[in-house]
Amino acid sequence: MPRLWRLEGTIDTDVLAPGFYMKSPLPELADHCLEAVCPDFARTVRKGDVLLSDANMGVGSSREQAAEVLKYLGISAVIAPSFAGIFYRNAINLGLPVFTIDESFMRTPSLANGARVKFNFDAPELLILDNATCIKLIPIPDFLKELILDGGLVPHLEKRFLQEGSHS
């Protein structure tokens, strides 16, 4: 059952993809994702888990690997009141769903670390299964949803060019 990872404070790209491991292969880099704030994250995260962060998620350097490691580790969505622009764009370009949440929901007690959750990409909403609370997320434009569903920017462009090429 997917669960919620509630991260507090500033989660920057150096915490997501530590500089010391940047030249390492992705699996090794992923082993160190968030270790400075949640040492057991990389070992215990499961496919489908959702990450909830405070405002300005992904601030810092423009390292694409910060979003890439989350996708590699199986995070189904990253939710925050706001994102650093480059992290937000990198996540979408890699096909990692990122949604904003109204700041007022951040005080909701049911959004606790470890809560059992179900993320609905299409709605978009986060259902907290422990108490049947439904948190509405701020929708993203349809063209970004399509890009994410295609697996990111490169697969999206490949799909478009293949479709256009078949019409020639």
Image: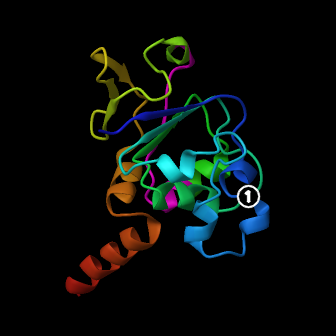
Residue 100 counted in the magenta span:
yes
Residue 101: percent from left, percent from top: 49, 26
Left or right of 81 in this view: 126: left
Identify whether 137 is placed above or below 144.
Answer: above
Quadrant of the rendered image containing residue 55: top right
Determine the residue positioned at 45% across, 53% down: 96
Q: Secondary structure at mark 1?
A: loop
Determine the residue positioned at 34% across, 39% down: 2
Residue 151 counted in the magenta span:
no
Identify whether 91 is placed above or below 38.
Answer: below
Q: Residues within 10 Å of mark 1 (few under 14, many from 20)?
A: many
Residue 9: percent from left, percent from top: 71, 29
The residue indicated by pointer 1 is: 18
Query: Quick one: 84 or 135, which is closer to the camera?
Result: 135
Identify whether 77 is placed above or below 17.
Answer: above
Query: Quick one: 79 or 123, which is closer to the camera?
Result: 79
Left or right of 138 in this view: 12: right
Extreme left residue here?
167
Q: Quadrant of the C terminus?
A: bottom left
The stretch in magenta equals 91-104
Determine the residue positioned at 57% across, 56% down: 67
Amino acid type at mark 1: Pro
